[in-house]
Image (cartoon, rainbow, N blue to C red):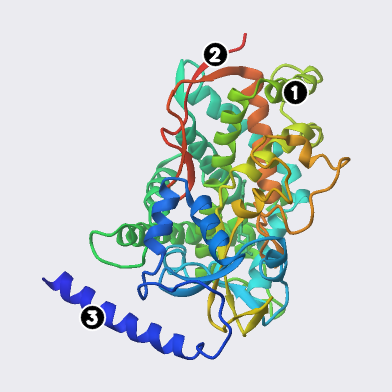
Amino acid sequence: MITVIILLVLTIFLFHRFRTRLSSSAAKNLPPGALGVPFIGQSLSLLGAMRTNTAEKWLQKRVDKYGPVSKMTLFGKPTVFIHGAAANKAVVFSGEEGTVSNRQVESLKMILGKRNLTELSGEDHKRVRGALVWFLRPQTLRSYVGKMDGEVRRHLNMYWHGNNEVTVAPLMKTLTFDIICSLLFGIEEGTTRKSIIECFKTMVDGIWSIPINLPFTRYNHSLKASAKAQQILKQLLKDKAKVMEEEKESEVEENDKDLISYLLRIKNKDKEQALSEEEIVHNIILLMIAGHDTTSILLTLMLRVLATNPTVYAAVLQEHEEIGRSKERGEALTWEDVSKMKYTWRVAMETLRLYPPVFGGFRVALKDIQLGAYTIPKGWQIFWAAPMTHLDETIFGDPQKFEPSRFDQNQTPIPPFSFIAFGGGPRICPGYEFAKLETLVTIHYLITQFTWNLSCSQDFLTRDPTLMPNKGLPIQIFPKS
Ligand code: HEM
């Protein structure tokens, strides 16, 4: 009974807020499309389509009916959906201060924490992003290749060798989570890592959900998991700060610093800690989610592509066998070895074109924006979706064909604002180089140590909320001698 009353009051309140906001936009030339039931609008229908991996078709229907710009209601907010390179340029890639800002769905903000990078704008965004980008740049990553190499080999010895069949998706999640924990945060194997992993599994579940905080909702479970993860991370920060206090500056080896120590150490011009404790914790959570739930999907889908495309498999294998021949047995890969894996990276990019792990994202209009004949009113949410542009046959001819040569820089370059698996503009993914290194090192050891066959006859993709083969991609594996 109490639940019903709460829901009723919530609905009346939201309906009122929604009506007030809409009436101020009435005079403008709004894009076509219906806003639907207040607050809910098209959210459930889109979420349903995502779960059955038919969201592209769902959006294509809108594009066919209304054109590339249309309005709807998503996750409680009036929203304009945009499609195509021109709209991507105007919104996703727009660096113009004061026109658009990033906007994540309410559930993401509350689960990741309100000081996470995707919620910050202006100077705050530059300050925090600058700190993360410094740590994720190639010059810093170079010194991590050996450690990453060690993590991948340890993982294969623990979870792959000695088995005839494995399920790829959960293993790739474990691997990428372990790499992030160890390389970025200095959280090595043990109880802290285990408790954090458990929290993250639950957190991810509620990220794209309707933000109704009642005991039975996914959103509620995710919020609780987030609170627990934040507690663990705050304690970790305290422990690191204590160690740093005791450490003499001369003992701080540049390469031994993990991202947390680095973030605790950087100072602003007044010689105060540049990032608050809350900002560090919220951004560790962001990096853990953004960094492992994306690359793990890419790796899973690459294994699927390699299992079903013998020509691509043979070319990738050749590239890695050549690199392997120049190494002593057991010798770790170097930055130079990884930079030779050009064809493999094209295969990764083509995989991301067809199956972008991040379906799309949100921005918010900071003032009225004119897009073609339509106005996007100030305060409205803007929704962009990567697969729509990636499957546009005017940009990528024969778009369903798997063709890594599209990403060969010596051939015709990809038109600007058309490949958006990593987003674009001032928000473009800062983890690109990290993801690239991790993907290439992992594929090297997988393809030189194993062959594999898909063992699930009815294999298809779902999005719940992230892209995934329905059964997690079980495969039979055969170690090479
Ligand atoms: C295949 C792997 C990955 C893909 C496809 C991917 C994709 C994306 C996309 C689409 C965005 C949104 C960009 C926008 O709004 O314009 C994003 C943002 C972000 N990604 Fe990644 N990502 C990947 C790996 C990583 C990794 C490994 C990390 C960290 C180690 C990372 C950290 C971030 C962060 C911090 C943001 C927020 C940037 C901001 O708001 O300024 N990502 N990523």
- Residue at which label 1 appears: 315
- Which mark is first along the chain, 2 or 3? 3
**Quarter of the image where one finds residue 165:** top left
Q: Which residue is mark 3?
A: 9
Looking at the rendered structure, the secondary structure element under dot 1 is helix
56 and 219: which is toward the camera: 56
Residue at the disc numbered 2: 478
Which of disc 3 and disc 1 is earlier in sequence?
A: 3
Query: Are there few (<14), some (14-19), or many (20+) residues within 10 Å of tag 1?
Result: few
Question: Where's the C terminus, which quadrant?
Answer: top right
Disc 3 to disc 2, C-alpha distance? 59 Å
Mark 3: secondary structure = helix
Nearer to me, 148 or 211: 211
Give the foreground label among 3 and 2. 3
| Circle 1: residue type | Ala
What is the crowding at mark 3: few (fewer than 14 residues within 10 Å), some, or many (at least 20)?
Answer: few
